[in-house]
Image (cartoon, rainbow, N blue to C red):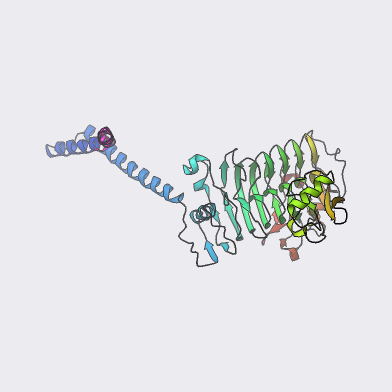
Amino acid sequence: MNKKHGRAKGIKTAGRGKISILLMIVALALAEGCGGESKEEKAMRVAIEARMKQEKTDAKAEMEAKMARSPDVSWYGSHSNEFNISTAQQLAGLAQLVNGGESFIGKSVFLTSDIDVSAFGKGSKFNNGKGWIPIGRGDGFFGTFDGNGKKISGLYINNSALDRAGLFASVGSYGYGTVKNLGVVDVDITGGNSTGAVVGYLIEGSTYNCYSSGTVNGKDGVGGVVGAINSGNGSNLYSTGTVSGNDNVGGVAGYMGGGLSSSYSTGAVSGNNNVGGLVGSISLESSYCVGGVSSRSDCRDACINSNLDNCDENCCTEACYESDCENPYSPSTLKNSAALNTSVHGTKNTGRVVGVINNQKSSQRRYDMGTGTLYEEVTEINNVISNNIAFSGLKDRDGRTNRWTAKGAKGGDGADITAATIAKDGTLGQRFTAKDGWATENGKLPGLGREAVDLPEHLK
């Protein structure tokens, strides 16, 4: 009963403004019928008409804004494997579908026009003002997203508690998942761990022919294009934006456990630990492999009897129970890339190209059926760093250019290249060529698509 009364009261209150306007109109009409309106009455009428017009305009604007930030999934049908999208609402619809459990495995989405997603961004009521909801917040996006050389602008995220922040949250697993041929420009992103403009966390998929600009800020694993690459691969990527974070911060990728090639960055990069112009840190985790064991429990028992560490039932790989096996992991690679940044600032493990290179050991545990024990073979795995360059005027946190000690094409600081040489050769020493999909022009930087990129001021 109280609720009903309260509701009625609310309705009455909400309608008072309109009732007052109506009463004023009636009064003016009566005044006009009694001999015309006075100057004061005319002024009142004009004010009322202006107010009514403004209210109508505001209501229309609010309705249009609400429609603009409403995800559209009408383009999707489970019967098809290929889809075209051309609006911000349809892109938000893709996020809604993937985050709701549709992995898009075996399916492709094509972008057919440039998209401005600012309706979901700063100043919008969407997502409580926190901005874009990344695609793949659950298990991830396993399909193929082809940007067709188009651009997405106005991407805004303001949520430092949001891990895997970016246009896409997570991409790839089991060999599926690709984002390609896409520009994400003028971004304004503040996220948590694994934050990047295009992809927050690249698990086992691939990202290529993508670029970004704007500002990206996060915590651990922050990159201009991709926040963290687990065991996936990136190629033909570049960023002209500013990147900042705490640990594992890079101009293109913050953390990398896979591969990166033919990529570059030009913006300022800053962080605390593991900071690089291209990649913050490169790592390969230890792996264990065993042969000749018939079950997990046998592996565990033999491990314990052999006085080895990590002796749970997961210490052996199923595929290796019956026979010897080779190491299933390969080194991470960073090659044919360029750190052309204005500056790279870090307090520990800082490099022009990569902050830290973690060459790790891999252990193969083999079962001796004669003795019933495990023995361990340890192999050193060296990540492959090759043919990388860095702008000779790139500054450290103290504004110095002469403190980079790991120079060379295979070093964390890359080989020197001057601004004059950069301007003279648009391919940057044949690292970026037309046959690999780059648009090159002397006096400019390599671009994706049809046009090269204008040189930033610090390289002129």
User: Residue 440 at what x, y percent from top left?
Assistant: 74, 60
User: Residue 98 at what x, y percent from top left?
Assistant: 54, 54
Considering every residue shown, the one lying at the far left of the view is 34
User: Residue 244 at what x, y percent from top left?
Assistant: 69, 39
Q: Residue at x 26, y 38 (%)?
A: 18
Residue 386 appearing in the image:
no
User: Residue 95 at what x, y percent from top left?
Assistant: 53, 53
Q: Residue at x 58, y 52 (%)?
A: 136
Q: Residue at x 60, y 43 (%)?
A: 188
Q: Where are the magenta residues, as a range?
A: 1-18
Up-down: is 305 above or below 366? above
Pick whichever, 64 or 108, lies toward us: 108
Magenta highlight on residue 452: no
Predominant secondary structure in magenta? helix
Magenta highlight on residue 12: yes
Residue 457 appearing in the image:
yes
Pick whichever, 275 or 257, lies toward us: 257
The quarter of the displayed image where residue 107 is located = bottom right
Quarter of the image with the N terminus is top left
The quarter of the displayed image where residue 174 is located = bottom right
Looking at the image, residue 383 sits to the left or right of residue 254; the answer is right
